[in-house]
Image: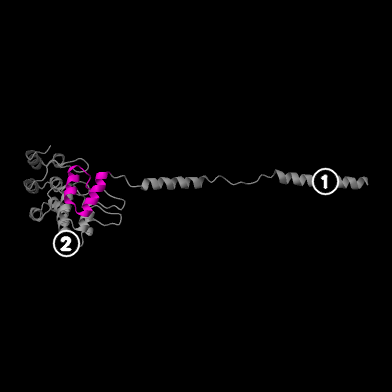
Amino acid sequence: MHLSFLRLMGLSCLLALVIGIGGCTPTSTGPATSSNTGNSNATANANTAAAPAARSADEIALLEAAIKGDTAAVKGLLDKGTNPNTKDDEGRTPLTEAAYYGHTEIVKLLISKGGNLWAKKKDGQTPMSMAASHADLVQLIKHNMDLLDAARNGDNKAVQTLLDNGAYVNVRDAEGRTPLTEAAWENKVDTVKLLLDKGADPNLKKDDGTGPLSIAVGREHKEIEDLLKKAGAK
């Protein structure tokens, strides 16, 4: 009996030891899902960054007026200094919409106030492609775009023809370059004379702040510098 008792005690101790070891084994809960939290924050930040800049009431009104063909409203808003290149969520500008709906006078107004003929909507459409069903507007837009190249190349015959066909002498490209800044850069003296005679603004600056005079001075085009100063360039 004494031996049996000892065996029983031994088995009991062994069982207790096994249970104890099992109970002390830590339960794995896995690492905190910080990467998921990070992804959520990144997504939220991306969504915030993608949100379009808020437009003013006048900018919204300008786009609507360009769509409707309300020339008087467009002129009034532009005269107030409303941004002619304001964009909505789809990248539409007053110029893309006026071109699409065939509002020729509004297109001319927008170009005269710095409307960007190279602007692209989110779907890649430009004022030129939007005007596809209006041959007169396609030509008008093309003439304005070509004027910059003609002035840059010193092609006075082309400059004269384009101006005679409705191109705007102070048309600006996407970087604010004008026919006059381009002619000054390339030292096209006769072209500068022609553009000034046709009413080119000698003080109209590019988006980077450089104007015809600073270009002529910087590139040491003395004759053009003198012409511009006589025309009131500062």
Identified at 17% across, 51% down, the residue is 71
Give residue 208's position: percent from left, percent from top.
22, 42
Tell me where the magenta segment starts and ends, as one range.
56-85
202 relative position to 127: left or right: left
Give residue 211's position: percent from left, percent from top.
16, 41
Q: Nearer the viewer, mark 1 or mark 2?
A: 2
Give residue 203's position: percent from left, percent from top.
13, 40
Magenta stretch mostly in which secondary structure?
Answer: helix
Q: Choose between 9 and 213: the one closer to the eye.
A: 9
Locate the C terminus and report the quarter of the image it occupies: top left
Q: Are marks 1 and 2 in contact (CB under 8 Å)?
A: no
Which sits earlier in the primary sequence, circle 1 or circle 2?
Answer: 1
Q: How many neighbours does mark 1 have within 10 angstroms: few (below 14), some (14-19), or many (20 or more)?
A: few
Q: Residue furthest top?
A: 234
- Residue 24: image quadrant is top right
Determine which of the numbered discs, if any, sits on residue 24 in the image.
Answer: none
In this rendering, the count of numbered labels is 2
Q: Tag 1's secondary structure?
A: helix
Q: How many neighbours does mark 2 have within 10 angstroms: few (below 14), some (14-19), or many (20 or more)?
A: few
Q: Which residue in the protein does label 1 denote? A: 12
Q: Which residue in the protein does label 2 denote? A: 135
Three-letter residue code for mark 2: Ala
> How far apart, in angstroms, are the residues tagged by discs 1 and 2?
101 Å
Above or below for 201 versus 165: above
Identified at 80% across, 46% down, the residue is 14
Three-letter residue code for mark 1: Ser
